[in-house]
Structures are given as structure tokens and as C-alpha cells.
Amino acid sequence: MNRFAANPDELQELFVGLVDGALTPEQHDRLGKVLQDDPAARQCYLLHMAIHGRLLKKRLVPSASLVRLIEFANNLNSLC
């Protein structure tokens, strides 16, 4: 059963696009709506951004490499 209003692939695409500064205006609006309407997506978003921030702070991965990290984090759905 899908716990999110948006499907996990869409969430991943929106999170990656946000991190990479590549969201279209429509995608940005969609992400805002999903985060406003979906508490589970908000929790997952916060987890993704926390991981992103920590890795960038430690300079462990460049921003563009976070696609793989987010794919890994999608497997943490039980935490989201």
C-alpha cells in the first residue's frame, strides 16, 4: 500500500530536482502541494534534506551524486 499522496518515484524526482536546482515551476508547485497535503511526504522530505545537508557539510558527495543517495533513502520508507 502506498503511504504517500504522490508515488515514491515522483517524490524522488521532485527531491532530486530541488536539490539540483532543476525543478520546473510546475514541479516546484507540485512539490509544495504534496508537502502541504501529505504528512508522510513531509517526513520523508525532511529525512532526505537532513541527509543531503549532512553529506554536503562533510563534503562526502557532490550535490549531483545525491540521486543515488535518494534511491537508497527510498528503501527507508519504513522510516518515512
Image (tube, rainbow, N blue to C red):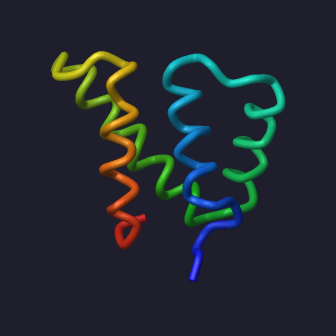
Question: Outermost residue toward the bottom?
Answer: 1
Residue 18 x %, y %? 58, 28
* In front of the other: 23 or 40: 23
* Residue drawn where x is 63% and y is 49% of the image: 10
- Quadrant (top left/top right/bottom left/bottom right) for the N terminus: bottom right
* In front of the other: 24 or 40: 24
In the picture, measured across the screen, residue 11 lies left or right of residue 38, that is left
Q: Quadrant of residue 55?
A: top left
- Quadrant (top left/top right/bottom left/bottom right) for the C terminus: bottom left
* Residue drawn where x is 59% and y is 75% of the image: 2
Q: How many labels does the image show?
A: 0
In the picture, measured across the screen, residue 69 lies left or right of residue 42, that is left
* In front of the other: 42 or 22: 22
Residue 38 x %, y %? 67, 63
27 up-or-down from 76: above or below: above
* Residue drawn where x is 57% and y is 52% of the image: 9
23 up-or-down from 27: above or below: above
39 up-or-down from 32: above or below: below
In the picture, measured across the screen, residue 2 lies left or right of residue 28, that is left
* Residue drawn where x is 78% and y is 42% of the image: 30
